[in-house]
């Protein structure tokens, strides 16, 4: 997803991706809600996997786990911000599902 640059994965890239949205073809625009949901599902799955792992080990210090946790939540927040800023009307349940997954990560 990072290489495709369709959706932002940091707050710093949100406005850039919103501006780029105007240049997307109709095929991409019509499928963007599915791309957003799939990306959020990936982030949520990674978050659950991180939380489901055993406590910090010498190979995986607590600080590294906290940093990854924070990074995943920040990426989810960037997706929500992007979804709210793009000038495109998505299905109503798309935003609700995105927000629900993001809330479960906090």
Image (spheres, grey):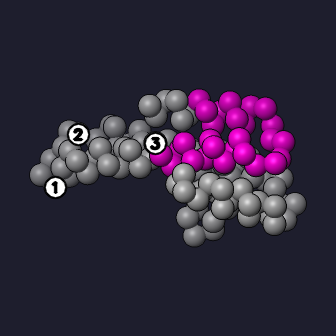
Left or right of residue 84, residue 27 in this image: right
Query: Could you say which disc has been placed on residue 72 in the image?
Result: none
Label 2: which residue?
54
The answer to the question of whether label 3 and label 2 lie on touching residues, with beta carbons closer than 8 A, is no
Q: Position of residue 49 (x, y in %)?
A: 38, 43
**Looking at the image, which residue is at 79% across and 32% down?**
92
The magenta stretch spans which residues?
A: 74-100
Residue 46 in sight in this render: no
Label 3: which residue?
73
Left or right of residue 17, residue 69 in this image: left
* Front one among 23 and 4: 23
User: Nearer the N terminus, badge 2 or badge 1?
Assistant: 2
Which one is closest to the eye, mark 3 or mark 2? 3
Q: Residue furthest right?
A: 26
Q: Position of residue 45 (x, y in %)?
A: 47, 43
Query: Could you say which disc has been placed on residue 59 in the image?
Result: 1
* Front one among 30 and 19: 19
Q: CA distance from mark 2 to mark 1?
A: 12 Å
């Amino acid at each position: 997803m990072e290489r495709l640059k369709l959706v932002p994965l940091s707050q710093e890239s949100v406005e850039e991706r919103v501006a780029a949205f105007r240049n997307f073809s109709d095929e991409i625009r019509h499928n963007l809600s599915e791309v957003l949901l799939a990306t959020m599902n990936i982030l949520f799955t990674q978050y659950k996997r991180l939380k489901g792992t055993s406590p910090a080990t010498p190979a995986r210090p607590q600080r590294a786990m906290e940093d990854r946790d924070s990074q995943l939540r920040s990426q989810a927040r960037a997706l929500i911000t992007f979804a709210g800023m793009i000038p495109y009307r998505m299905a109503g349940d798309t935003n609700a599902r995105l927000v629900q997954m993001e809330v479960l990560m906090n």
